[in-house]
Image (tube, rainbow, N blue to C red):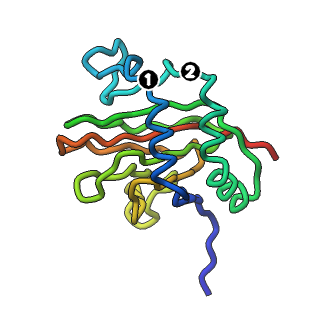
Amino acid sequence: MIDIMFYVPIYHVAVNDWNRKKEILLSFIDHNKLIKPADSNRDEHITTDYHNTDNNKIHLIENTLKVDLDEFAKAADTKTSIHSYWFEKADIHEYHPSHNHGMGLYSAVLYLEYDKDLHTPVEFISPFLNLVNGKHLHYIPQDVQEGSLLVFPSAINHFTHPNKSLKPRTVLAFNLNIHE
């Protein structure tokens, strides 16, 4: 018998009515607030509006994704609300280095513009080392496509590889409060 002592859940939700929701969510991007890495005073490696978003849009995003967020909440046996959000647009050579979003939340990535033949998804680093060789374990979600919503514990380190394509990879990222 094999039993699992520890595990880290990741929820993969295929957003329903994707084409309609994609247009709505893309319309929420304020391109004037997107800051390219060369224009950032922080050590950024990706075009983003992080720390520069309109919090009035949180309810619009929640309403747009209500059915999909409810699907996650049911699977996770919890209630959530969006705490913060931002858009990231990875142009050629841009990437997001390893980071996490702290403790006590869930984080999410929704792929708005994503070509599975050209782009790579977020990659996760296990909080556990390989018990045989002590190396870090990585997890790459499978079957990611436009409309894929990945929800995971915020404390899990994750990153993206540089975009090797001229076609941008655009995501909506957000943190979720947990209401038990």
Q: Quadrant of residue 4?
A: bottom right
- What residue do we see at 72% from left, 44% from top? 80
- What residue do we see at 55% from left, 58% from top? 16
Q: What residue type is disc 1 on?
A: Asp
Spot occupied by residue 147 in the image (x, y as percentages of width and height): 46, 54
Q: Contact, CB < 8 Å: mark 1 with mark 2?
A: yes
Counting every numbered tag in the picture gives 2
- What residue do we see at 66% from left, 54% from top? 67
For residue 15, side relative to residue 143 (left or right): right
Spot occupied by residue 86 in the image (x, y as percentages of width and height): 49, 30
Residue that extends furthest to the right in the rendered view of this protein:
180
Label 2 residue SS: loop
Q: Mark on residue 151?
A: none
Disc 2 designates what residue? Answer: 54
Q: What residue type is disc 2 on?
A: Asp
Spot occupied by residue 45 in the image (x, y as percentages of width and height): 30, 28
Disc 1 designates what residue? Answer: 30
Q: Quadrant of the N terminus?
A: bottom right
Mark 1 or 2, nearer chain start: 1
Say if residue 79 shows up in the picture: yes
Label 1 residue SS: loop
- What residue do we see at 41% from left, 67% from top? 132
Mark 2, Cα crowd under 10 Å, few <14 / some 14-19 / many 20+, is: some
For residue 29, side relative to residue 70 (left or right): left
State the residue in front, 130 or 180: 180
Image vertical order of residue 36 relative to residue 122, above or below: above
